[in-house]
């Protein structure tokens, strides 16, 4: 074979290789789009995480009137809607978690409202609130086990939320526990906000931030 023909063949092969590499890079960086004909076409996950995170970050008791209204509609109703949409999409874990914490915030709003309106039941409500937070710590620990096959973002959120609920249970009777619960709650909420944008950037921009990659520890 003539030398010119060989060189031309090498050049074509090199160009094809470069084109394949560019195509692969473009595919990796392309936004993740659903190819199935689903009723819910978007991903409600980032919205649900923002509802949770933006509400959980309110850790100061002096903000209580603002937090109550905020928790009812954004943290409660908004997150519950995200949970229903996740269940429709077939995401059992996301739907169960979002709907549960959405109902929690709506229940928290009603409890705080009743405690303010009826001070005579305050002491009785405190005992029930301790049990309530303890049960939610147990429930969150169950959710955390599932996150061991999800990603680092969700693992961080649920692990710190277990600690937050545990401290809240003790914080009903001890101010130091309540203060510590506020710090952990703020970190948990901030982690949820980070996770929301990490998943949003992954879906829309194809950018994978730290903690968003899948893991399988169990």
Image (spheres, rainbow, N blue to C red):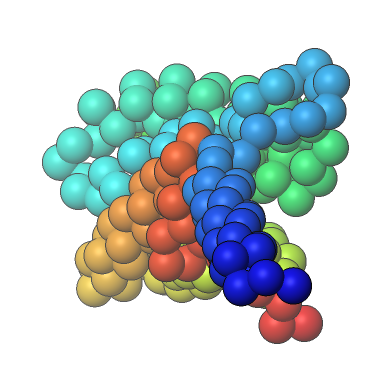
For residue 98, side relative to residue 164 (left or right): right
x and y percent of residue 102 in the render? 57, 35
Q: Residue at x 42, y 67 (%)?
A: 210
Write the residue at 55% across / 38% down.
31
- In the rendered view, does 87 fall on the left or right side of 10? right
User: How far across and how far down the image is residue 96, in percent?
Assistant: 74, 44
Q: Is residue 57 visible?
A: yes
Quarter of the figure with residue 177: bottom left
Snapshot quadrant of residue 87: top right
Q: Residue at x 53, y 70 (%)?
A: 152
| Front in this rendered view, residue 181 or 7 | 7
- Residue 165 at what x, y percent from top left? 48, 63
Question: In the image, is residue 89 above or below residue 104?
Answer: above
Q: Based on the displayed image, in which of its 4 quarters is residue 184 positioned?
A: bottom left
Task: Judge from the rendering whether residue 118 lies leftward or rightward of residue 199; answer left or right.
Answer: left
Q: Using the image, determine if residue 55 lies above or below residue 3.
A: above
Where's the C terminus, which quadrant? bottom right
Residue nearest the observer in this picture, 23 or 82: 23
Residue most extreme to the front: 2
Can I make out residue 136 in this image?
Answer: no
Residue depicted at x 81% and y 45%: 92
């Amino acid at each position: 074979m003539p030398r010119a023909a060989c060189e031309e063949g090498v050049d074509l092969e090199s160009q094809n290789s470069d084109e394949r590499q560019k195509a692969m890079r473009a595919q990796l960086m392309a936004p993740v789009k659903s190819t199935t004909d689903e009723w819910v076409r978007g991903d409600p996950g980032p919205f649900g995480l923002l509802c949770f995170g933006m509400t959980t970050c309110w850790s100061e008791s002096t903000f209580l009137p603002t937090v109550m209204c905020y928790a009812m509609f954004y943290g409660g109703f908004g997150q519950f809607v995200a949970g229903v949409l996740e269940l429709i999409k077939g995401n059992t874990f996301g739907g169960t978690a979002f709907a549960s914490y959405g109902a929690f915030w709506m229940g928290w709003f009603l409890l705080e409202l009743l405690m303010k309106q009826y001070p005579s039941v305050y002491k009785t409500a405190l005992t029930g609130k301790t049990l309530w937070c303890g049960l939610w710590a147990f429930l969150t620990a169950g959710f955390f086990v599932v996150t061991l096959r999800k990603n680092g973002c969700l693992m961080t959120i649920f692990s710190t939320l277990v600690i937050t609920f545990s401290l809240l249970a003790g914080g009903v009777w001890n101010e130091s526990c309540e203060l510590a619960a506020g710090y952990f709650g703020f970190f948990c909420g901030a982690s949820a906000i980070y996770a929301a944008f990490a998943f949003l950037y992954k879906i829309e921009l194809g950018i994978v931030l730290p903690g968003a990659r899948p893991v399988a520890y169990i």
